[in-house]
């Protein structure tokens, strides 16, 4: 089993920044790639970014200039980050950490990001 716990969401004004974190624990040695997804009201869950254990990243084209994904690997805990800059109202969504990607078996509980003035 792998446990994923997200944090860092909140309310931010347009143009602001947030840094999401996801603490992964459990049988993390089995996990190579991890990722961030988001689900906006009335929309399907979509991939935001992925990163593998070697640090190779993938971000959806429309967010490459505003979002950065990174991770730290420790013996018993991996932490996944999503740095989001120049946030827009359309970035409002519940953000989920997931592993492994692209077909996750494990999901976090999500952290809400709301971009509004």
Image (cartoon, rainbow, N blue to C red):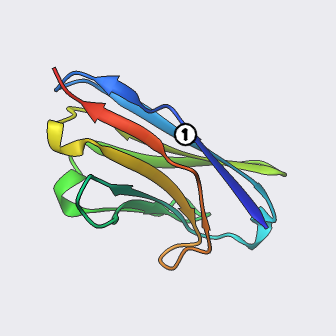
From the viewer's perspective, is residue 24 above or below residue 88? below
Image quadrant containing the C terminus: top left
Report the residue that reaches farthest toward the bottom: 103
User: In front: 41, or 37?
Assistant: 41
Give the residue at x 55% y 74%. 104
- Residue 35, percent from left and from top: 49, 61
Quarter location, residue 18: top left
Residue on which the image places disc 1: 21
From the viewer's perspective, is residue 11 above or below residue 46? above
Q: Is residue 1 left or right of residue 40?
A: right
From the viewer's perspective, is residue 99 above or below residue 69? below
Q: How many marks?
A: 1
Quarter location, residue 84: top left
Disc 1 crowd rating (10 Å Cα; few below 14, some 14-19, many 20+) is many
Give the residue at x 42% y 49%. 95
Q: Is residue 82 left or right of residue 73?
A: left
User: In front: 74, or 6?
Assistant: 6
Give the residue at x 83% y 51%. 76
- Residue 28, percent from left and from top: 76, 63
Image quadrant containing the N terminus: bottom right
Q: Callout 1: helix, strand or loop?
A: strand
Give the residue at x 59% y 54%. 108
Q: Is residue 94 left or right of residue 25?
A: left
Q: Is residue 36 left or right of residue 44?
A: right
Report the residue that reaches farthest toward the front: 42
User: In front: 50, or 106?
Assistant: 106
- Residue 7, percent from left and from top: 55, 35
């Amino acid at each position: 089993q792998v446990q994923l716990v997200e944090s860092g969401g909140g309310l931010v004004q347009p143009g602001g920044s947030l840094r999401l974190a996801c603490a992964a624990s459990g049988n993390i040695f089995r996990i190579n790639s991890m990722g961030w997804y988001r689900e906006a009201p009335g929309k399907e869950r979509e991939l935001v970014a992925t990163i593998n254990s070697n640090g190779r990243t993938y971000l959806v084209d429309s967010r490459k200039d505003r979002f950065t994904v990174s991770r730290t690997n420790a013996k018993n805990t991996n932490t996944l980050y999503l740095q989001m800059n120049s946030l827009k109202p359309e970035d409002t969504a519940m953000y989920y950490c997931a592993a492994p990607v692209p077909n996750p078996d494990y999901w976090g509980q999500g952290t809400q990001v709301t971009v509004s003035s």
